[in-house]
Image (cartoon, grey):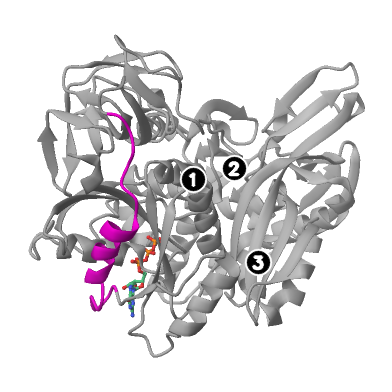
Amino acid sequence: MDPSHIRNFAIIAHIDHGKSTLSDRLLELTGSLTTREMQAQVLDAMDLERERGITIKAHTVRMMYKADDGDMYQLNLIDTPGHVDFSYEVSRSLASCEGALLVVDASQGVEAQTLANAYLAISNGLEILPIINKIDLPSADIERTKAMIEKSVGLPADDAIAVSAKTGLNVASILEAVVTLLPPPKGNADAPLQALIFDSWFDAYRGVIVLARIINGKLRKGMKIRLMSNGKTFEVESMGVMTPKPVVLEELSAGEVGFFVATIKNVADTKVGDTITEDARPCADMLPGFEDIKSMVFAGLYTVDSHEHALLRDALEKLRLNDASFSFEPESSAALGFGFRCGFLGLLHLEIIQERLEREYSLDLITTAPGVRYKITMTDGSELEVDNPSRWPDPTEIETVEEPVIVAKILTNEEYVGNILKLVEDKRGRQKNIEYVSETRVMLTYELPLNEIVLDFYDKLKSVSRGYASLDYNLAGTWISPMVKMDILIGGEPVDALSIIVHRDFAYDRGKALVSKMRELIPRQMFEVAIQAAIGAKVIARETVTAIRKNVIAKCYGGDISRKRKLLDKQKEGKKRMKRIGKVDIPQEAFLAVLKVG
Ligand code: GTP
């Protein structure tokens, strides 16, 4: 199609501000879906996404729209993932567009992710059209929302379109604005092929499916393509667009967006942000912005039942086929047996993988406390990276430890600023900036160690702000910090899977809190169990689980048999998630206790 009649745009928003609802409404208005076909929120395809109400994978839909000027336009709506863990993917989806709809909930106003996404769109050179959503709500305040967009995002909001994605009110005028206000793609259809990968996934029947934006040239069926980051070549087998039903095409041309399948077996070969070119007539340069994304958060995954270890490996391999940002390698723990060290983009990513393993593969898992990757310089000048406390070197040979640091932007109401400042200071935060973005909303910018964030920062932030704080973060270098390895000993035995890396000045408090939490979690046994926290040979905290005096069943002696059965069942249920370490049964929660005591 003539690029002047193409518009590529994304919808960006804070979580729950109505991105999916609005997308569905646009599909409906352009006749892309009949009501019968229309399931609630088609763009959020995965079950889990729907349940959690967040968009994880980006998808794209082509709509045809007849504008007021009488011409037919091809509108490509590119959906972006809605969570901070996936901001690289968001940025690549945005790089495939010329424009973006910035959706802001009229009852909530601008939130941290609204800003983060708007800045990403601005830095990708996109034209932004503000949309004020949920105007059907009694608490909607259009004028205040406009003022916030102007003050905090720095975009003129006079022309913002006020809509209700839920009722459909005024949504049609968005389509007209997309055609008249957003720029068409540039690009030369006769130049060598240059296309951007912005998403890919594995389909059991068809292999890897890639979503791409054609920047220059043409992608044709049968073409031998080359992926520029790794030089691998493949032959394009089939291609097309989603409408949202897949429609097969023979070619995609400069300015267009679509999917293709090309004998690619491994999703890790099709990295988001990579450039595709024609093997026989390659383009000169890769498109800018490519990054090899690295896992930031690491945790050990073990099965409660050691016989399920092979099942876990199969399940991880299957998940990995579909998710190149997730990594794993075998590890073993003296306490937990054989398991896997897994790397994730962030905590949400970890939770999603863990939930899928438990739900789709029916595995009972023990997850060890999540941590980050440290760069250690040894006294002999050598360097190593450590993401697993069990590989922490001998402290006497460590010269320096570098820990990853993020810049966090927290947007909140002024009454919660005091609480939040205390929280970030407790988490070793360093203040960069505090500013009012409207009369009552404050943006706090802090540097924080990632290690502190992966524990329970987000939950704490929500609780100290009663939910009135939103968070967005980016990785921002490293600090040299005095980090130490803290071991937990149960019954005198160090349990390797419970070791964590902490800042030296926090070790004492963390150790005390941790052993006292453990004492609550570890059930009483027939004998006394000591729980100790230690750094090297030095014990810094100790608690004791006293021995059981009486047999619990004796209590119901003479009582009703069903009650006795219930008690036994309950004990069995409790046992399910226990791991026997030495002589002591340790429940699964104990491995995550470290999350609860930050
Ligand atoms: P993520 O996928 O998590 O980014 O969320 P989202 O931005 O896609 O939000 P979604 O469309 O799922 O909407 C969140 C909630 O707001 C849902 O319960 C919607 O029904 C509701 N909602 C969306 N638009 C409107 C609206 O115009 N008015 C009202 N009252 N509710 C709306």
Residue segment shown in magenta: 165-188
Q: Residue at x 15, y 61 (%)?
A: 69
Q: Which residue is mark 2?
A: 580
The answer to whether 536 appears left or right of 370 in the picture is right
Q: Residue at x 62, y 53 (%)?
A: 473
Q: How dense is the environment of label 3, judged by Cα within 10 Å: few (below 14), some, or many (20 and up)?
A: some
Q: What SS does tag 2 mark? A: strand
Q: Which labelled disc corresponds to residue 460?
A: 3
Q: Answer with mark 3 or mark 1, whichever residue precedes in sequence.
A: 1
Q: Report x, y in % for residue 423.
A: 75, 66
Asked if disc 3 and disc 1 are in contact, CB closer than 8 Å, the reply is no
| Front position in the image: 196 or 416 | 196
Q: Quadrant of ligand 1?
A: bottom left
> Does residue 83 sit above or below 152 in this rendering?
above
Q: Position of residue 199 (x, y in %)?
A: 36, 37
Give how far across and how far down residue 47 sits, in percent.
29, 54
Q: Is residue 391 left or right of residue 300?
A: right
- CA–CA distance in space, label 2 to label 1: 53 Å
> What is the residue that sits farthest to the front in this orientation?
69
Q: Secondary structure at mark 1?
A: loop
Can the viewer see residue 517?
yes
**In this rendering, does residue 521 appear at all?**
no
Mark 2 crowd level (few <14, some 14–19, many ≥20, 10 Å Cα): some
Identify the image quadrant of the N terminus: top left
201 or 167: nearer the viewer: 167
- Which amino acid, by three-letter code, is at mark 1? Asn
Residue at the disc numbered 1: 124
